[in-house]
Amino acid sequence: MEKDQHELYEYARKRLKQKKRLYFHFVVLFLASLFLFIATKIFSFNPETNWYIWIITIWFFIFLLHFIKVFITDRFMNKNWEREQLDRLINLQKKKIAELQAKVEDETTIK
């Protein structure tokens, strides 16, 4: 690979990693919010409850998070998805570079 292609690839890979992290954090935030809402409204959890209930609750949250990650997130964002996203990002970068080069060429020919 040429140096430019390698830079495009690395940048696209970095953006892809950020996108996956964003999805994961969204899932964590959503599940935690939902879980805390259910825990406070339906089960009437409060700070005075016994410590073992909190341990079971935290364990169940971690289990649910793992379940979502394995059966939903990883299935949705598998290697094929990563490859498609990487190709799409590289193509967008190439298109933007071509537009910038055309703009620079137009400016140089005008002067």
Image (cartoon, grey):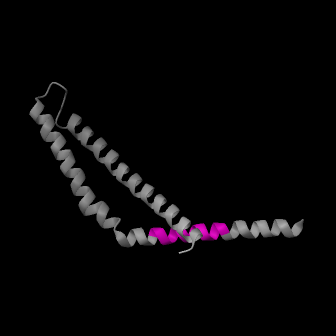
Horizontal placement of 41 versus 97: left or right? left
Q: Can you give x and y, in whole percent of width and height, for residue 16 in the image?
A: 45, 61
Rendered residue at 48%/59% (across/down): 15
The answer to which of 4 and 108 lies nearer the viewer is 4
Rendered residue at 47%/59% (across/down): 14
Horizontal placement of 6 versus 26: left or right? right
Residue at far right of view = 111
Residue at far bottom of view = 1
Tell me which corner region of the image, top left, top right, bottom left or bottom right, holds residue 97: bottom right
Rendered residue at 26%/39% (across/down): 37
Q: Is residue 50 above or below residue 82?
A: above
The answer to which of 99 and 43 lies nearer the viewer is 99
Q: Can you give x and y, in whole percent of width and height, for residue 81 in the image?
A: 39, 69
The answer to which of 5 and 55 lies nearer the viewer is 5
Identify the magenta region: 85-97
**Residue 18 falls inside the magenta stretch:** no
Q: Can you give x and y, in whole percent of width and height, for residue 75 in the image?
A: 29, 66
Residue at far top of view = 48
Horizontal placement of 60 versus 90: left or right? left
Rendered residue at 9%/34% (across/down): 52
Q: Can you give x and y, in whole percent of width and height, for residue 111 in the image?
A: 90, 65
Number of numbered markers: 0
Secondary structure mainly formed by the magenta segment? helix
Q: Is residue 99 above or below residue 24?
A: below
The answer to which of 95 and 2 lies nearer the viewer is 2
**Residue 92 falls inside the magenta stretch:** yes
Q: Is residue 7 above or below residue 46?
A: below
Q: Is residue 44 above or below residue 78?
A: above
